[in-house]
Structures are given as structure tokens and as C-alpha cells.
Image (spheres, grey):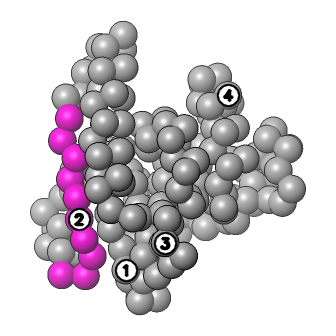
Amino acid sequence: MLITIILKQKLESLPPVINLVDCLIDLGVSINLVCTDIDGFNYDRYIKKISIKIIKFNDYGFRPFKIFSLISFRREIHKYLESSDLGFRDDSFVWLASAEASLGVGHKISKYKFVFQCHELYDKVIQYKIQNKFYFQNSILNVCPESNRAAIFRYWYNLTQNPFVLVNAPYF
């Protein structure tokens, strides 16, 4: 099995994704990790076990210009996905590791088999709440960190079942 994990930020900024990678390595799953940066310690720890693709783009801090960062990331991620058959083979799928990654990838992800992992409720950021609906309803599996959030997501997005709970606990 081949899983491509997409993260639109530095790997260390979301420790649950590090736990996910460690768990999948122990299960013997082949992993492509696509992120914007990775710390030297984790890079050295993973480089012999998984494929790592770093996508560099200009990150505009000024809010009105963040759309340019999003477009740049989207262009690079689609170029990467289209250059391979990731998400199309029976034994592979794409794992969107955060809501930011899903917004970065966009709705074109629907042509791939994908898992959507959402860490936060985003109840105060209406843009995320509205746009997450597409990813929750079109993914092959939804993942969140707590059972109460799973129930809330099921209610908000009219899901047929609760998202799978992958707790935010250290993996040893």
C-alpha cells in the first residue's frame, strides 16, 4: 500500500502527523510525505524509510496576498500528483493531513482517492467550515482527533458515520 501524505506546513507544526507517519512506518506502509519543510532531526530519521518531497513557495504574511501562496502551493502539488499515478492505483491514496492542506490542494483532489484529516473544529473561521464540507463528503475516510469532534463533524456535514478518531497521543 502507498499513502501520499500532504501537509501545507512544516511537519513539526502538527505533531499528530508525525505520530501518523511513525505508525504507518511500523505497519509497513510505503509513504510519500509532501510538506513545505521538515526539521533536520526528522529528515534524518525518515529519509531511509519514506519518500520526502519538500514544496517551497513564497509564503506571504500579509493576509490579502496569502492567495498567491495558495496558488503557488496548489500549482506545485498538482504538478507532483499528476506526474505519478498516486491516488489512482487500487493500493494507493492521498492523505490530506490538515484543513490547510485541503484548501491548498483544492477540489481537483476529488479525482483521487483521498482521506481527509481535520484537527480543529474551525467554528469561528467560517471559510474553513464551509469549504471543509466538500472534503468531508467526498473523501473515502474522515479522521479527527476526538470523538466529540467526530460527532460534531457528523452533524455539521450530514455524514453517514462518525469520522475515524486518531487521538493526539504520542506514538511509541
Q: Which residues are magenta?
A: 48-57
Specify whether 92 is left or right of 47. Answer: right
**Residue 117 visible to an observer of this rendering:** no
Q: Give the alpha-carbon distance from disc 3 to disc 1, as whole Å.
A: 13 Å
Judged by depth in the image, the label closer to the viewer, 3 or 2, is 3
- Disc 3 marks which amino acid? Arg
Q: Secondary structure at mark 1?
A: strand
Q: Are marks 3 and 2 in contact (CB under 8 Å)?
A: no
Q: Which residue is mark 4?
A: 130
Specify whether 34 is left or right of 137. Answer: left
Q: Residues within 10 Å of mark 3 (few under 14, many from 20)?
A: few
* Place of residue 163 in the rendered image (x, y in percent of width and height, measured from the top left): 73, 59
Q: Earlier in the sequence, mark 1 or mark 2?
A: 1
Q: Give the alpha-carbon distance from disc 1 to disc 2, as whole Å.
A: 11 Å
Q: Give the alpha-carbon distance from disc 3 to disc 2, as whole Å.
A: 20 Å
Q: Secondary structure at mark 2?
A: strand
Q: Which residue is mark 1?
A: 30
Q: Secondary structure at mark 4?
A: helix
Examine the structure image and report whether residue 49 is included in the region drawn in magenta. Answer: yes
**Residue 142 visible to an observer of this rendering:** yes
Q: For the point 37% across and 80% down, which residue is it? A: 30
Residue 89's disc number: 3
Q: Work out whether residue 26 or residue 134 is closer to the camera in this orientation and state it.
A: 134
Examine the structure image and report whether residue 61 is included in the region drawn in magenta. Answer: no
Q: Which residue is mark 2?
A: 52
- Disc 4 marks which amino acid? Ile
Vertical position of residue 116 compared to residue 52: above or below: above
Vertical position of residue 84 compared to residue 99: above or below: below
Q: Are marks 1 and 4 in contact (CB under 8 Å)?
A: no
